[in-house]
Image: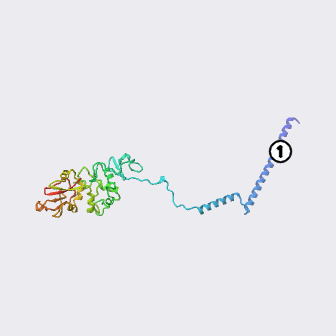
Amino acid sequence: MPARKRQTRRRECSGLFLWVSNATRLDTTWESIADTSNLNAKMSKSPSVITPIKLIALSFLVFLFFIFQFSSPVSAIRKDVSLQERYTCRTTVQGRYLVADDMGQVCDALSIDPHSRCCRGKREQFACHGCNLVSQCCNRSYEFCVSCCLNPSRTQKDLALNVKIAKPVTAGTYSSLFNFCMGRACRHNSESVVHENAYLSEFHHCFSIPSNSSGSSGAQAEARLAGINVVIGRQGESCNSVCKSSGQSCVPNKFLLLNQCETMQKYLGCKGGCLASVGSDQPAEVVDDAPRDLNPGACLYTSQQSMLSCEGSHQHTKRLCPCA
């Protein structure tokens, strides 16, 4: 037999031997797998044998039992700081350039924080620029009047919240000091205008509590006259002249406090009584030598508040003037 054929024959015999060996190993492997499966089946049927899977499951159940049995109940939900509500300011809307927020700050419209609606940065609180603190009136702007009005040392909150929004008895009252200052106080009203078409004074934004507010009394009227010098004028003299002679100015928005019998009787004799009248010289007292038909010695208060004026005068009366 040639050498090449002998080599080919050897290779074929070697391949056949390897194939038989591999087949034998595969049979052994499958037998081992079968034996293992039979063993697992027997173990699963036997209640006394605990498999690793059962052990893991049992451990997990014990863990859950301890969690639900011994864990404390949740008493509250944590409130994340980032989710806390931010304070939002209320602001005035009347001015063209300036804005006053309910914190008592004044700024221009471009300085309003877009999120809080408050004036940004540190600003003067309760600013009273252009305001006469005695008469409680401002001439610079409506916004500074609101800011000054919000100062609790200048406006008594309990009195402000008793002021009626309108004249009818059924009208409600203000819900907050900011509503009072923004609505009733600093807007133009009967205390700052005359004949409904002209200002009594350049200080026409006034935040004083009106004398006809709910719960007003003589003691409260005296308190609102603090800082006011009540002067009795000479016969035929106007309040502008009376106050100027003492180096002061007439405060028109305080006439409502003086235009009451109870107040006039504290300063004037009122021997002829207290009578309602109509005239720009009132409140006033008729002089004793006046004609009898003018009620000499009587105190007169006007029934038309729009006629109250610092300029009015009458040749037979002496005016009661608020000066500061």
Left/right placement of residue 233 relative to residue 127 reads left
At x 36%, y 47%, the residue is 109
Q: Is residue 85 left or right of residue 235?
A: right
19 vs 53, left or right, is right
State the SS at label 1: helix
Residue 306 occupies which quadrant of the picture? bottom left
Kindly give the residue lying farthest to the front in the view shown: 246
Q: Quadrant of residue 253?
A: bottom left
Q: Residue at x 81, y 44 (%)?
A: 18
Residue 299 image point, x, y percent: 17, 61
Label tally: 1
- The quarter of the picture where the N terminus appears is top right
On the image, numbered disc 1 is attached to which residue? Answer: 17
The residue that appears at 84% across and 38% down in the rendered structure is: 8
Please indicate, yes or no, whether residue 148 appears anywhere in the rendered image: yes
Name the residue nearer the viewer: 243 or 67: 243
Q: Position of residue 37 (x, y in %)?
A: 75, 56
Identity, as a three-letter code, of the amino acid under mark 1? Phe
